[in-house]
Image (cartoon, rainbow, N blue to C red):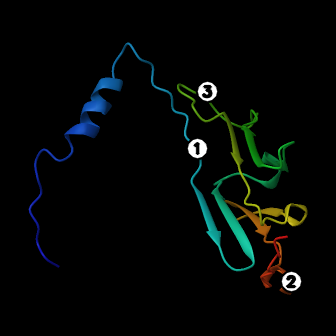
C-alpha cells in the first residue's frame, strides 16, 4: 500500500450541496429506492433488488402496455395487538416503491420469472436465442 496525500478541499462541492439542502425551510424526504443489481450472461439478464423483510406478496412484477418491466412494491405494517406500549416515533409503517425498466430488444418477455429469496427479489429475463440463420450475411443485389 502506498500512502497518498489527501487534498483538504476536495470534498467541498458535496458538502456545499448537503448544507444548502439541509435546512429548516426545505423539508427533507426520506424516500429511498432499493439497491438494484443487473447482470448479464450469454443466455439471461438477471436483476436483483434488495428487499429485506419483504415477502413475495409485497411485490407485483409485470409488463406494461409498452412492454417495459414494472416492479411495484408496497409494504404495510399491520398493527399488532400483542405489542405493549405505544410509538413515540414511527417511520417505517408504510413503504411504496415502483421501478420501470426498459427491456433490451433481445429479452424473451414471455419467459420472465421472479422470486423472493433471502431478502432479495430476483428477476430472470431470458434472452432470445439466436438461430444459425441470424448469423448468415446475405448480399442483396441492387438492380
- Percent position (x, y) of residue 46? 70, 68
Label 2 to label 1: alpha-carbon separation: 42 Å
Mark 1 touches mark 3? (CB < 8 Å): no
Q: Is residue 118 visible?
A: no
Q: How many marks?
A: 3
The residue beneath circle 1 is 33
Question: Mark 2, residues whose alpha carbon is within 10 Å: few (<14), some, or many (≥20)?
Answer: few
Residue in front for this viewpoint, 119 or 35: 35
- Toward the right, the furthest residue is 110
For residue 118, above or below residue 51? below
The mark found on residue 86 in the picture is 3
Q: Residue at x 62, y 63 (%)?
A: 38
Q: Residue at x 77, y 47 (%)?
A: 70
Q: Residue at x 83, y 76 (%)?
A: 141
Quarter of the N terminus within the rendering = bottom left
> Which mark sits nearer the N-terminus, 2 or 1?
1
- Toward the front, the furthest residue is 143
Q: Residue at x 35, y 25 (%)?
A: 21
Residue in front for this viewpoint, 41 or 93: 41
> Which mark sits nearer the N-terminus, 2 or 3?
3
Label 1 to label 3: alpha-carbon separation: 28 Å
Secondary structure state at the residue bearing disc 2: helix
Image quadrant in which you'd find residue 74: top right
Q: Is residue 61 left or right of residue 32?
A: right
Mark 2 touches mark 3? (CB < 8 Å): no
Residue in front for this viewpoint, 9 or 67: 67
The residue beneath circle 2 is 133
- Percent position (x, y) of residue 24? 36, 15
Q: Is residue 123 left or right of residue 27?
A: right
Mark 2 touches mark 1? (CB < 8 Å): no
Residue in front for this viewpoint, 127 or 9: 127
Amino acid at each position: 500500500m502506498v500512502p497518498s496525500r489527501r487534498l483538504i478541499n476536495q470534498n467541498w462541492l458535496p458538502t456545499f450541496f448537503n448544507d444548502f439542502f439541509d435546512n429548516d425551510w426545505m423539508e427533507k424526504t426520506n424516500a429511498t429506492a432499493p439497491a438494484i443489481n443487473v447482470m448479464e450472461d450469454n443466455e439471461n439478464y438477471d436483476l436483483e433488488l434488495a428487499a429485506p423483510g419483504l415477502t413475495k406478496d409485497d411485490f407485483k412484477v409485470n409488463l406494461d402496455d409498452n412492454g417495459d418491466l414494472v416492479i411495484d412494491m408496497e409494504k404495510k405494517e399491520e398493527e399488532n395487538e400483542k405489542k405493549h406500549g405505544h410509538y413515540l416515533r414511527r417511520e417505517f409503517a408504510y413503504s411504496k416503491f415502483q421501478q420501470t425498466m426498459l427491456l433490451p430488444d433481445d429479452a424473451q418477455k414471455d419467459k420472465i420469472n421472479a422470486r423472493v429469496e433471502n431478502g432479495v427479489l430476483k428477476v430472470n429475463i431470458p434472452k432470445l436465442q439466436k438461430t444459425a440463420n441470424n448469423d448468415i450475411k446475405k448480399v442483396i443485389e441492387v438492380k
